[in-house]
Amino acid sequence: MTEKRYFIETWGCQMNEHDTEKMAGILSEMGYRATDSVDDADVYLLNTCTIREKAEEKVFSRLGVLKKVKEKRNGDMIIGVAGCVAQQNGGDIFQRAPQVDLVLGTQALKQLPEMVGRLHGHQGRQLNVEKDPDNHLFPSHVPKRGTSIRARITIMEGCDNYCTYCIVPFTRGRERSRPWQDVVNEAQRLAGMGFKEIELLGQNVNSYYSTVNFARLLRELQAVPGLETIRYVSPHPKDFDREVMETLRDCPKIATNIHLPAQSGNSRILKRMGREYTRELYMEKVYMIREVLDGIPFSLTSDFIVGFPGEKEHEFWDTVTLLDEVGYDRIFSFAYSERPGTGAVKHADSVPQAEKMYRLKILQQHQLEIQKERMGGRVGKTANVLIDTVKPGEEFPLVGRTRDNILVHIKAEVGSPERFYGRPVTVTVTGTGLHTLRGELCGQDPIEHLWSPIAASVG
């Protein structure tokens, strides 16, 4: 019997990438093998994202290409749409793209084996976009993880914030947290498999609560032997409290790259967005972070939306001045795009597209100047780096990230760079780009523990 093969194409966030690992694990347990060629796939899944405008158009454009692949195989190919576009559009996908056999919602991953089985049994197209309040309780042994030293763990799903621009509460549902013991057990299992870094996932990760809060969960994970770094995405400013920051201060394995999504620097626009804080309250969080982490290297990043309905020019400039006041290491910025079903759709006072793009350009150029200065300030300082990539024969054979998540390319006169893979090293920063650093290895041996006291000399 010919071995069946699968191909999964993933668009979107880390949560989508981890959902792909889950689906890959399910298909592997069913006897399928991964393929790098779409033409060879017996099952092709498109794991989609709908956070940005025109996401649906891109999905259906891609499905048009796959229709031709399926025709070449005389229809002997299962095409499935998963993720947020599947959840949002449901059975309408079959109407627009009859070549699709399977539509799998964000909370239906566990149903994938039965749905594929029914397709093999010629039981017709399969659709499941039902809500499953326990979908976040996914068997931890199933996800098919990569070969790097980094692994992801879902700790919660869903969002209760209902920001007026965001579709996530409608595609991912209300907040649901995993029991903290399950999270710790999975982390222990991954550490035992050789993973050195874990990334905790959730739509609003710091609102996690399951008899213990997010800060306590981080402290429990700090105690897991074998782990070097614990990262997390994505947080909400309203849930960033002093207890979380004191945990980062006291627990050296917890990463100090702090993502504090502002979205706007103007309080009236923030209220329209449903963000539940003002500019002043946001800055109080920033001051608190600086106070608690004084002497510890950390980076601040943020998300911004320009051209939100009703945003006046002077309100946009409030966002520009927020960049100066905070001094972000990086930002992720977008022009507002309407998402069907969200609260912002009711606002009729839209900003012209040309004006939105103009404002976006100004914001991004302003951030580049700030970023150049902040990155340049790291030159000459010392940092500890966990090596996650080795490139023998190159001038900078070692690559890794600092505790505050800055990528570093490291020059090292070593005969066998492979021995550094998955190990922490001490580096002197010698140069910088906009997003990465260059450095030289201090000494020829990895250090015993990653975040040693030397880290306090950085930043």
Image (spheres, helix red, strand yellow):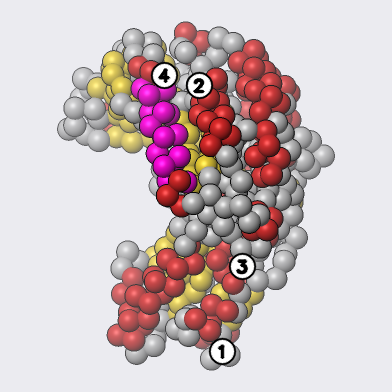
SS for dot 1: loop
For the residue pair 193 and 12, the one nearer the viewer reads as 12
Closer to viewer: mark 2 or mark 1: 2
SS for dot 3: helix
* Magenta stretch, residue numbers: 356-372
Q: Mark 3 points at which residue?
A: 87
- Screen quadrant of the N terminus: bottom left
Q: Name the residue under label 1.
A: 124
Disc 2 packing (10 Å; few <14; some 14–19; many ≥20): few
Report the residue at 79% width, 36% height from top. 212
User: Tags 2 and 3 in contact by the CB under 8 Å rule?
Assistant: no
Horizontal side of residue 389 vs 226, given as left or right: left
For the residue pair 444 and 287, the one nearer the viewer reads as 287
Q: Which of marks 3 and 1 is nearer the N terminus?
A: 3
SS for dot 4: helix
For the residue pair 25 and 355, the one nearer the viewer reads as 355
What's the CA distance linking mark 3 and mark 4? 41 Å
Q: Position of residue 287 (x, y in %)?
A: 64, 17
What's the CA distance linking mark 2 and mark 3? 39 Å
Q: Name the residue under label 2.
A: 324
Q: Name the residue under label 4.
A: 374
Magenta residue check for 360: yes
Q: Position of residue 213 (x, y in %)?
A: 76, 35
Residue 385 can be seen, yes or no: no
Q: Which amino acid does label 4 sit on?
A: Arg
